[in-house]
Image (cartoon, rainbow, N blue to C red):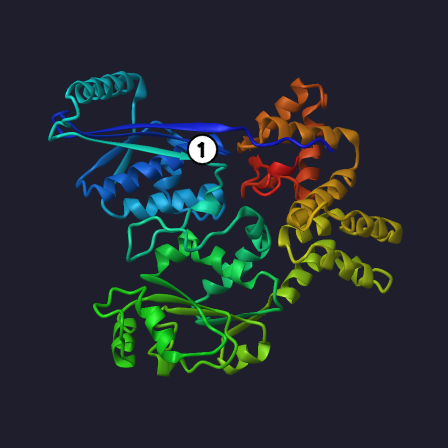
């Protein structure tokens, strides 16, 4: 298999703030050099500008942006937890501070904006170090191998500072990608107020919670999203203080149960308790009971299913069982045959609890009864990485290699390579994708292209929109082709 990397994007920021009369107020210049897709670069620039506006305490600001796609998505209410989605979520949170975004007519405005910026830079340079009172010029430089999910965190309800408290690399998110939607649907059930997630160490419990916390749907639904990592030696006072630190309470050094209870009863909160080792009396801490009426939710993780039972959760989810069911559902009934059960377990184990890897392997083995094919899958997955640091990447290369060779013919494989080479950072309409295959002599008929497309979607190697008209490569696969 040929591997293609992402393209290198340099995002240059040059933004000018003017009042209603066109008078220059402030400027921002800078650049980002990193591993970005174009729409991520556009959204990243927007996020930086919005944060700067908030930091400068500018009021009644209308931001003009030339990217129709970025403006449309930022102003919508869609849910996306990819790298691009995290940046969009940050932009939405900042827009809630009273900033509006419109599409700029760049053909008419770009020249004027650039000239205004250049004039004021010239004035600043000729003022011998004395900056005009009306003018603030801020310079920014962030050079890195950029990954939004590695560096960006969702803005807190209580703070407008972009922090890195919930750092999630794209590789870690791969662990929970295909089970996140299942969990989100359960959280959306009004009759489920307490959810317990259990499983052994390394199965991805904390990663799942991190992914949940940055979901725009969660941030939009709840007034406060509170995260507490529970220590092994439980201290209720410290637990209460940690919750209070994330709330607008005047005294964050000492907090009484009644004070915390009184505040939380008046708001809609989403409380995450990560790493519960023993029963916690939530009422003693000062946490009111979540109910369908108040709409509050509590999600906890623990290694023990018994802790979930003692905490009286409405729903107990065992991640290992959920991953196994994900595999079986996609492989279909053939997986329950006696000669395949042990082999299936070995394949799931070799995926190291990464749901996307499990998903692709299950698609590649769907309805396959040949034991030799299953043994070949195990041999492919058991190829060892060069070093422990490369384990995850090696798993995905092995998975994609097996999936690639399981495609029915060379035409389908060439079409997949074509997608990886030309459309790695785009969503593509059905007609455009098939027309491209025909123009590149990969197929000679539209009907054959339709069949190839269907095969790639069924294999999980291309993602389809709900209406079946738009397609893209999976976020976590693009770097491996």
Residue that carries the numbered disc 1 in the rendered image: 39
Position of residue 320 in the picture relative to residue 22 (left or right): right
- Mark 1 neighbour density, 10 Å: few (under 14) some (14–19) many (20 or more): some
Q: Residue 116 at what x, y percent from top left?
A: 21, 19
> Observer-nearest residue: 282 or 362?
282
The image quarter containing residue 472 is: top right
Say which quadrant the C terminus sits in. Answer: top right
Position of residue 30 in the picture relative to residue 411 (left or right): left
> Observer-nearest residue: 80 or 83?
83
Position of residue 64 in the picture relative to residue 233 (left or right): left
Q: Please tell me whether mark 1 sits on a helix, a strand or a loop.
A: helix
The image quarter containing residue 456 is: top right
Looking at the picture, does residue 477 appear above or below residue 250?
above
Q: Residue at 50% of width from left, 51% of height from top? A: 168
Q: Residue at 20% of width from left, 37% of height from top? A: 61
Q: Residue 224 at what x, y percent from top left?
A: 33, 62
The image quarter containing residue 246 is: bottom left
Q: Residue 31 at what x, y percent from top left?
A: 38, 29
Say which quadrant the N terminus sits in. Answer: top right
Position of residue 250 in the picture relative to residue 471 (left or right): left
Q: Residue 282 at what x, y percent from top left?
A: 39, 79
Looking at the picture, does residue 131 appear above or below residue 317?
above
Q: Residue at 29% of width from left, 68% of height from top? A: 267
Q: Residue at 79% of width from left, 47% of height from top? A: 380
């Amino acid at each position: 298999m040929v591997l293609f990397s992402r393209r290198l994007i340099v995002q240059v920021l040059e933004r000018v703030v003017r009042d209603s009369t066109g008078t220059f107020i402030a400027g921002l210049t800078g650049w980002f050099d990193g591993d970005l897709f174009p729409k991520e670069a556009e959204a990243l620039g927007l996020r930086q500008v919005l944060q700067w506006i908030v930091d400068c305490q500018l009021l009644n600001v209308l931001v003009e942006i030339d990217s129709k796609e970025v403006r449309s998505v930022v102003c919508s209410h869609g849910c996306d937890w990819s790298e691009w989605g995290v940046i969009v979520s940050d932009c939405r949170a900042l827009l809630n501070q009273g900033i509006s975004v419109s599409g700029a007519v760049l053909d008419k405005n770009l020249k004027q904006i650039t000239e205004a910026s250049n004039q004021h830079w010239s004035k600043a340079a000729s003022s011998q170090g004395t900056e005009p009172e009306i003018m603030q010029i801020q310079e920014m430089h962030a050079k890195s191998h950029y990954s939004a999910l590695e560096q960006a965190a969702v803005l807190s309800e209580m703070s407008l500072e972009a922090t890195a408290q919930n750092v999630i690399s794209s590789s870690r998110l791969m662990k929970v990608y295909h089970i996140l939607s299942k969990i989100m649907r359960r959280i959306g059930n009004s009759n489920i107020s307490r959810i317990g997630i259990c499983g052994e160490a390394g199965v991805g419990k904390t990663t799942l919670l991190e992914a949940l916390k940055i979901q725009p749907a969660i941030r939009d639904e709840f007034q406060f999203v509170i995260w507490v990592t529970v220590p092994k030696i439980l201290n209720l006072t410290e637990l209460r203080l940690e919750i209070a630190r994330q709330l607008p309470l005047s005294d964050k050094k000492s907090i009484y149960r009644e004070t915390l209870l009184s505040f939380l009863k008046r708001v809609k909160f989403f409380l995450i308790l990560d790493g519960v080792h023993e029963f916690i009396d939530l009422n003693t801490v000062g946490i009111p009971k979540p109910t369908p009426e108040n709409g509050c939710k509590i999600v906890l993780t623990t290694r023990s299913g018994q802790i979930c039972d003692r905490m009286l959760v409405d729903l107990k989810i065992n991640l290992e069982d959920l991953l196994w069911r994900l595999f079986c559902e996609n492989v279909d009934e053939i997986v329950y045959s006696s000669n395949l059960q042990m082999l299936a377990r070995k394949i799931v184990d070799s995926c190291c609890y990464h749901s996307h890897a499990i998903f692709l392997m299950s698609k590649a083995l769907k309805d396959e009864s040949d034991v030799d094919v299953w043994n070949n899958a195990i041999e492919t997955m058991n190829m060892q990485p060069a070093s422990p640091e490369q384990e995850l990447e090696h798993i995905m290369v092995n998975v994609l290699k097996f999936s690639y060779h399981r495609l029915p013919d060379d035409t389908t494989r060439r079409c997949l390579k074509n997608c990886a080479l030309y459309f790695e950072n785009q969503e593509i309409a059905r007609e455009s994708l098939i027309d491209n295959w025909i123009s590149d002599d990969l197929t000679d008929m539209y009907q054959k292209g339709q069949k190839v497309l269907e095969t790639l979607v069924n294999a999980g190697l291309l993602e389809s929109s709900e209406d079946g008209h738009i397609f893209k490569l999976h976020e976590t696969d693009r770097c491996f082709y």
